[in-house]
Amino acid sequence: MTYNNPSALALVAAKEQFPEKPDPGLLVSCGAGVEKPGRARSRGTTNIVRTAGGRVEKRRRARPWSRWKLSSVGRVFGAFMSQNDSNREFERVRQHAVHRENFFRLDFEHDGPRPALDDVTDLKARQSWAEESAARSPSIDALALCLRAQHFYFELDDEPMYANRRYKCSGRVLCDLDPGSPEQMLLLDGLDRGGASFRLDGQVLPRDCLGRDARGHDSVVIGHVTFSVDTKQTKFSIEVCEGENRPYGISGSPFTVDWLVQAQGLDDHFGGGY
């Protein structure tokens, strides 16, 4: 009844929708904001009293709510409610994820008390504050790099040929944005100017595929790749590396030949239906 972890629920939904790829390569969790840690501890009343000698003293008096929280019942209630701590639950999900480096949490701290979720007053100011806080997040640059890499995917040209005890493979790296669209041009030109490269298991691929002359202006194909693997179950990765940043896998990476053949229907020699 207390279980309310959107990150875990999103992973369950993704596995049900895409059972052939049960480990999502990207997860973004957006929090509703938290109250600054110091505020909760400082909530008390300050009484100004005058002593017999005329000296003024400030004495803090805990509010009834604060006293209740320190009681045994209050501590049990606090432990019970901590199960709904979104940041803690997200971190728990992240620690068990295959691609945990691609799991991001964006949250921010309220200057004042956290507003109720059904409080719709001053939404514009709250939206601006949330956007500014997200832009300052240390995770935002890594998230942007990961999102750009996820715009690319890989397809085999055909079933691999087995020769000399290895499977010879050829395929294409493609972009999921409309060919020739402003969005695709902006993405690819930015990668080209930034010296980005595609990497196959750490080996840098020829980067001339990012240039407009090489890729054409109306193609989803970014580059051609040839390689070989020991078995059809051998995992291989294709990543995008921008500058000195760490590389991020394209959509679906790492792959196996078996998974690609099945996903593309390359082994369906007689057709999938009538």
Image (cartoon, grey):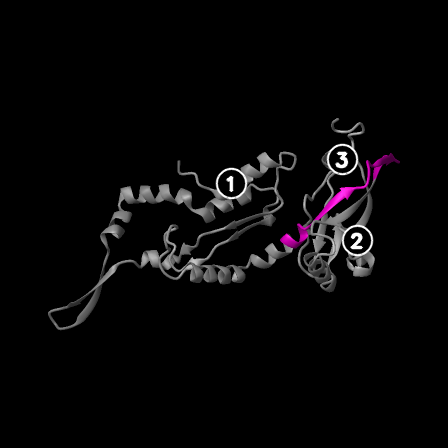
* Residue at 74%, 45% in the rendered image: 154
39 vs 5, nearest the viewer:
5
Q: Disc 1 vs disc 3: which is toward the camera?
A: 3
Q: Name which of mark 1 and mark 3 comes first in the sequence.
A: 1
Label 1 vs label 3: CA separation? 30 Å
Which callout, 2 or 1, points at the residue further toward the start of the chain? Answer: 1
Residue 259 rendering spot, x and y as whole percentages: 72, 35
**Residue 167 magenta-highlighted:** yes
Q: Which residue is mark 3?
A: 261
Mark 1 residue element: helix
Residue 240 lies, with reference to residue 258, above or below; the image says below
Please state the horizontal and vertical placement of residue 165, each as a whole percent of the image.
86, 34
Residue 1 sits above or below residue 186 on the image: above
Q: Residue 20: image x %, image y %?
A: 65, 34
Q: Position of residue 229 (x, y in %)?
A: 80, 39
**Residue segment shown in magenta:** 147-168
Which element type, helix, strand or loop, lies under badge 2?
loop
Q: Which amino acid is tagged 2?
A: Leu
Dot 3, crowdedness within 10 Å: few (<14), some or many (≥20)?
A: some
Can you name the residue that lies furthest to the front here?
A: 274
Q: Residue furthest right?
A: 164
Observer-side mark, 2 or 3, equals: 3
Which residue in the structure is indicated by mark 1?
8
Secondary structure type for disc 3: helix
Q: Residues within 10 Å of mark 1 (few under 14, many from 20)?
A: some
Q: Which residue is mark 2?
A: 205
CA distance for labels 2 and 3: 23 Å
The residue under label 3 is which amino acid type? Val
- In the displayed structure image, the side of residue 199 where residue 8 appears, left or right: left
How many numbered markers are drawn? 3
Of callouts 2 and 3, which one flags the residue occurring earlier in the amino acid sequence? 2
Would you identify the image quadrant in which residue 206 lies?
bottom right
